[in-house]
Image (tube, rainbow, N blue to C red):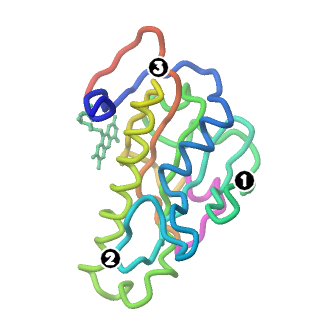
Amino acid sequence: MKALKLRATGRAFAPEPIPSQTLSNLLWAAWGINRPAEGKRTAPSARNRQEIDLRVVRADGTFLYDAAGNRLLPVAAGDHRALAGVQPFVKDAPLTLLLVADTSRMKGAVTDPAQRQWIWADASFISQNIYLVCASEGLATGVRALLDRSALGKALGLSERHVILLAQCVGRPAPSGPNGTK
Ligand SMILES: Cc1cc2nc3c(=O)[nH]c(=O)nc-3n(C[C@H](O)[C@H](O)[C@H](O)COP(=O)(O)O)c2cc1C
């Protein structure tokens, strides 16, 4: 109840990195495996396709969250935080989580426009998990759909089968700062 009460979109971030254990907990809660025997996860996905992957865009590179191994795998070198959004506050946050669908896991849905929309529903559950963990940890976060997907996808080496759905900055809230709405 407290986390739901505190859930809000933040748009002002302090630059310091968040502790690695906090990030590990956040990734597990967002989209980790909570039933190892079945390989099922903390968020539902249509037909259990699990087509979404989380990428962590940080100053020291971009990493893929490997839920099975509970680890981060480096996927792109360099600091791409400024490309992870079009709003000025984005580059200030220590990290952006990207929710990226791999449409090769969509099986028959690729040709069915209605089922294709389900990737957005799947992404929303993950996003809300992130919101609630951030609320409970005193972290700021805000989901974003406004992105230059083409530039970001190119910088991160994504292919045509990947769809960048949503981005979500995470960090300590800035001591003071603008927090307007979009
Ligand atoms: C699908 C979706 C896309 C959004 N895209 C952006 C965005 O690109 N930039 C932004 O600042 N906020 C974005 N938001 C956040 C909304 O503006 C925010 O949720 C809304 O103003 C309500 O505020 P609250 O989350 O604090 O309740 C988005 C929210 C959703 C659900």
Which residue matches tag 1?
Answer: 76
Which residue: 39% across, 26% down?
11
Which residue matches tag 3?
Answer: 173
Q: Quadrant of the C terminus?
A: top left
Q: Quadrant of the N terminus?
A: top left
In the image, is residue 105 above or below residue 55?
below
Q: Residue furthest top?
A: 176
Q: Is residue 161 left or right of residue 56?
A: left
- Nearest to N terminus: mark 1 or mark 2: 1
Instruction: Please tell me how crowded label 3 is: few (under 14), some (14-19), or many (20+) other residues with Cα within 10 Å.
Output: some
Which residue matches tag 2?
Answer: 116
Q: Which residues are magenta?
A: 152-161
Residue 63, percent across and down? 68, 51
In the image, is residue 5 above or below residue 148?
above
Distance between mark 3 and mark 1 Cα atoms: 27 Å
Q: Label 2 sits on what residue type?
A: Arg
Q: Label 3 sits on what residue type?
A: Pro
- Label 3: state its secondary structure: loop
Which residue: 38% across, 42% down?
143
- Closest to the camera, between mark 3 and mark 1, is 3
Q: Label 1 sits on what residue type?
A: Ala
Tell me if label 3 and label 2 are in contact, CB under 8 Å. Answer: no
